[in-house]
Amino acid sequence: MINGFTALCLTKLDTLDELTEIKVATTYKRNGVDLPNFPASVDTMHDIEVEYVTFPGWRGRSTSECRTFNSLPHNARLYVQFIEQYLGVPGFEMDWGWKRSYGDDPRLLKKSHVSS
């Protein structure tokens, strides 16, 4: 695979912990026509329509102490699984941005499942 991804790293998942919903942009359109990529020029953004998939958040359920995929809040798992399936990349490593300077970071979370 050239210029392809075989795995993704999802960082700062904990920054979404307090949101009641999370929108993921899936399609950009100009004049009703799907664009193959995100528009390259800010000057063309005024006539772009965006389609989103909206997920319920997991407000009140912190991800900061999670150590396994299955310990994530249910809605966080749905969000991660959607990204994985939408991009067609079957694996994630996740971590959180705070305290990186402490060396061996025990908060690294490796996903413990593979989507079908």
Image: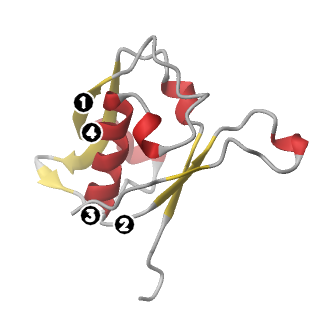
Q: CA distance from mark 4 to mark 3?
A: 16 Å
The answer to whether the residue labelled 1 contacts the one labelled 4, judged by CB atoms less than 8 Å apart, is no
Residue ID at (57%, 40%): 67
Q: CA distance from mark 1 to mark 4?
A: 22 Å
Q: CA distance from mark 2 to mark 4?
A: 31 Å
Amino acid type at mark 4 = Asp
The residue under label 3 is 36
How busy is the neighbourhood of tag 4: few (under 14 within 10 Å), some, or many (20 plus)?
A: few
The answer to whether the residue labelled 3 contacts the one labelled 2, judged by CB atoms less than 8 Å apart, is no
Q: Quadrant of the N terminus?
A: bottom left
Amino acid type at mark 3 = Pro
- In the rendered structure, find residue 47 and report the number of the disc placed on it: 4
In this rendering, position of residue 44 left or right of residue 31 = right
The residue under label 1 is 54
The answer to which image quadrant residue 64 occupies is top right
The residue under label 2 is 89
- Compared with 81, 50 (above or below) is above
> Disc 3 or disc 2, which is closer to the eye?
2
Percent x, y for residue 12?
Answer: 59, 37
Upstream in sequence: badge 1 or badge 3: 3
Name the element at disc 3. Answer: loop
How busy is the neighbourhood of tag 3: few (under 14 within 10 Å), some, or many (20 plus)?
A: few
Q: CA distance from mark 1 to mark 3?
A: 21 Å
In this rendering, position of residue 52 left or right of residue 46 = left
The answer to whether the residue labelled 1 contacts the one labelled 3, judged by CB atoms less than 8 Å apart, is no
Residue ID at (27%, 59%): 115
